Image: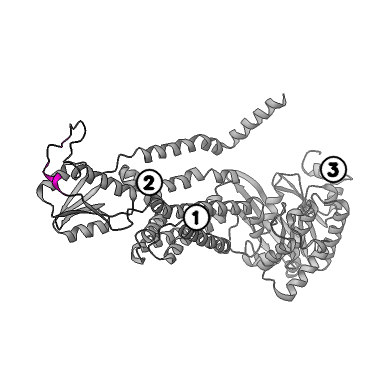
């Protein structure tokens, strides 16, 4: 029966291509595990600093579910907020409590405000069936706290927070795919071998590819950034030039990385199989999700994800409006990775020609 | 070896072996190829012809053994300019026109200006594609792609032409045309190495090397090979040297 012979042929093909088979099963497991780890993170515990609060209020805050740090001066609290070691600080000015939020991550801001509201807020009104600690009433006499932001503001949406990361993610993803597939085509169509029968040197091939694709990915970066800022109204506090520098570096990294991985793939199909292995985890760890609520060893993974550096730098520029000094490290890491991947490509081409 | 002998030699291969892992693909091949001759490698598919010819072209590297091409040990990047290579598969960019392909490959050999334009016209005319130069390669037929590959191999006027199955999938009249061109190039001083698995085509070469399981089982002119084997056809000769018919 022809149908059965087809059936057997397909089984045989799969058995010959063990990697496809493994990926068919392992990739979904991997992605599901990551999703579990990301969404199963515990509720975020806000880190709040206090400066010069009356003792009963201080005590009241300390009893709640938050990390409270008591600063001796307001200046120390301001520094801690800028450094990102706390999410907000509370102080009293002219008799009114003021909550100063770091503000770049709306989900953290919400957690802080919820906590402050629950502990200091309307405690004069008994809460429904009221089994909770409402008897400790004194601090409740404080007026409604005033909320201030270091970055962003109450109007800042989750999109503003995530959009900057998405710019990095999309740039990386598409450049990776296109570069990978076209270099693969070069190999499978025999043109790479043909190139190696010319005086062309290996590093010239790699750099030539970087340049040719660099032009188009540069245009891509420009279009993506311009579209999200001007059309989608994505928040941009810092310089657009820094945004472009970072996106160009992200695409250069993706480009060299895509070419490198293409030499480990035998077909376009196998290249696609790298997506759940190398792209999806990077997306998870690039700042779309709050890493602080995960176990430390998982959040540590972000240090080995190129995209995490790009996304961090984009966030710094676009939301916090920071300058060169705060993105320099990310920029150097991306540039360094790019050089590492390119060198690896030049070495990988040895497989095709010794010279 | 005398001085005159080394001058007339184009390529010397000494005890070439090539293995991938534990498997030996080419075993102990030694041969000399003279200048201005058409040397054919004849053997069934899978016998190692392509691997051998790639090693001789300096693309692949022998695991052991030495190759000297025009007095220079291979592989050597500068020798790439002296070799015109045509791969078994049509290594063309399908999303470019024929002229753009020529532009690209020619520029890799440093061709430019008036001379380059003239060369492009010459090679396109030679393979009969001058009226299709501006067509995208993806619209080409199989034979046209083969001809364009040959044109690309010739673009930089190489001293040595290395062709892997040059006439596969080409109709008889075009095949004749290509062979006439190969003879003409040979007379003008070019040395030609080619592979084939077609017996009657092998007879068109000046000298032949028979390849079986990665070993060079016999070399000589087609006439010599047939005579020694006491056969009348190349097939008989091949079977004789392969030890299948004693």
Q: CA distance from mark 2 to mark 1?
A: 19 Å
Q: Residues within 10 Å of mark 2 (few under 14, many from 20)?
A: some
B237 w.r.t. A327: above or below: above
Q: Which residue is mark 2?
A: A289
Q: Chain of mark 1?
A: A
Magenta: main secondary structure equals loop
Going by the image, does A289 lie left or right of B176? left
* Residue B234: image location, x then y, percent: 85, 46
The magenta segment is: A131-142
Mark 1 residue element: helix
Q: Are marks 2 and 1 on the same chain?
A: yes
Q: Chain of mark 2?
A: A
Q: State the residue lying farthest toward the bottom.
A: B114
| Residue at left offset 12%, top offset 39% | A136
* Residue B219: image location, x then y, percent: 78, 52
Mark 2 residue element: loop
Residue A191 in sight here: yes
Q: CA distance from mark 3 to mark 2?
A: 73 Å
Q: CA distance from mark 3 to mark 1?
A: 63 Å
Q: Nearer the viewer, residue B211 or A55?
A: A55
Q: Quadrant of residue A60?
A: top left
Going by the image, does A163 lie left or right of A300? right
Q: Which residue is mark 3?
A: B236
* Residue A294: image location, x then y, percent: 32, 42
């Amino acid at each position: 029966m022809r149908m059965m012979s087809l059936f057997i042929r397909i089984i045989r093909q799969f058995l010959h291509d063990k990697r496809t088979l493994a990926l068919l099963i392992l990739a979904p497991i991997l992605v599901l595990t990551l999703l579990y780890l990301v969404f199963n993170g515990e509720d975020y515990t806000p880190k709040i600093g206090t400066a010069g609060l009356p003792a009963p209020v201080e005590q009241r805050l300390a009893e709640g579910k938050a990390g409270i740090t008591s600063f001796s001066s307001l200046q120390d609290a301001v520094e801690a907020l800028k450094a990102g070691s706390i999410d907000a600080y509370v102080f009293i000015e002219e008799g009114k409590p003021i909550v100063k939020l770091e503000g770049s991550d709306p989900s953290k801001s919400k957690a802080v405000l919820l906590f402050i509201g629950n502990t200091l807020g309307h405690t004069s009104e008994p809460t429904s069936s009221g089994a909770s600690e409402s008897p400790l009433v004194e601090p409740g006499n404080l007026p409604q706290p005033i909320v201030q932001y270091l970055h962003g503001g109450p109007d800042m949406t989750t999109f503003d927070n995530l959009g900057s990361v998405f710019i990095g993610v999309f740039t990386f993803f598409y450049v990776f795919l296109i570069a990978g597939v076209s270099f693969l085509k070069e190999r499978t169509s025999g043109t790479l071998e043909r190139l190696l029968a010319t005086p062309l040197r290996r590093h010239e091939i790699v750099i030539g590819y970087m340049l040719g694709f660099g032009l188009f990915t540069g245009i891509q970066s420009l279009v993506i950034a311009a579209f999200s800022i001007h059309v989608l109204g994505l928040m941009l506090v810092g310089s657009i030039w820094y945004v472009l520098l970072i996106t160009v570096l992200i695409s250069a990294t993706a480009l060299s990385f895509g070419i490198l991985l293409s030499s480990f793939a035998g077909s376009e199909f196998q290249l696609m199989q790298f997506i759940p292995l190398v792209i999806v985890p990077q997306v998870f760890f690039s700042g779309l999700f709050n890493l602080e609520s995960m176990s430390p060893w998982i959040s540590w993974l972000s240090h080995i994800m190129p995209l995490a550096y790009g996304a961090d730098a984009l966030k710094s520029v676009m939301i916090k409006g920071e300058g060169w000094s705060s993105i320099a490290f990310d920029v150097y890491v991306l540039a360094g990775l790019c050089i590492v991947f390119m060198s690896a490509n030049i070495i990988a081409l040895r497989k095709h020609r010794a010279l | 070896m005398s001085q005159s002998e080394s001058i007339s030699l184009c390529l010397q291969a000494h005890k070439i072996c090539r293995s991938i892992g534990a498997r030996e693909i080419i075993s102990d091949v030694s041969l000399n190829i003279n200048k201005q001759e058409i040397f054919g490698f004849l053997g069934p598919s899978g016998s190692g012809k392509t691997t051998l010819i790639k090693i001789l072209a300096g693309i692949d590297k022998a695991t052991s053994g030495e190759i000297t091409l025009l007095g220079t040990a291979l592989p050597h990047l500068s020798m790439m300019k002296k070799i015109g290579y045509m791969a078994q598969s049509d290594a063309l960019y399908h999303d470019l026109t024929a002229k753009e392909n020529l532009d690209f490959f020619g520029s890799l050999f440093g061709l430019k200006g008036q001379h380059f334009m003239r060369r492009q016209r010459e090679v396109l005319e030679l393979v009969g594609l001058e009226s299709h130069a501006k067509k995208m390669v993806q619209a080409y037929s199989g034979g046209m792609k083969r001809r364009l590959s040959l044109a690309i191999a010739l673009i930089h006027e190489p001293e040595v032409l290395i062709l892997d199955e040059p006439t596969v999938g080409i109709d008889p009249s075009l095949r004749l045309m290509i062979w006439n061109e190969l003879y003409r190039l040979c007379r003008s001083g070019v040395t030609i190495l080619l592979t084939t698995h077609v017996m009657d085509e092998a007879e068109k070469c000046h000298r032949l090397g028979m390849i079986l399981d990665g070993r060079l089982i016999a070399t000589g002119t087609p006439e010599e090979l047939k005579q020694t084997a006491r056969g009348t056809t190349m097939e008989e000769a091949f079977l004789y040297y392969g030890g299948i018919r004693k």
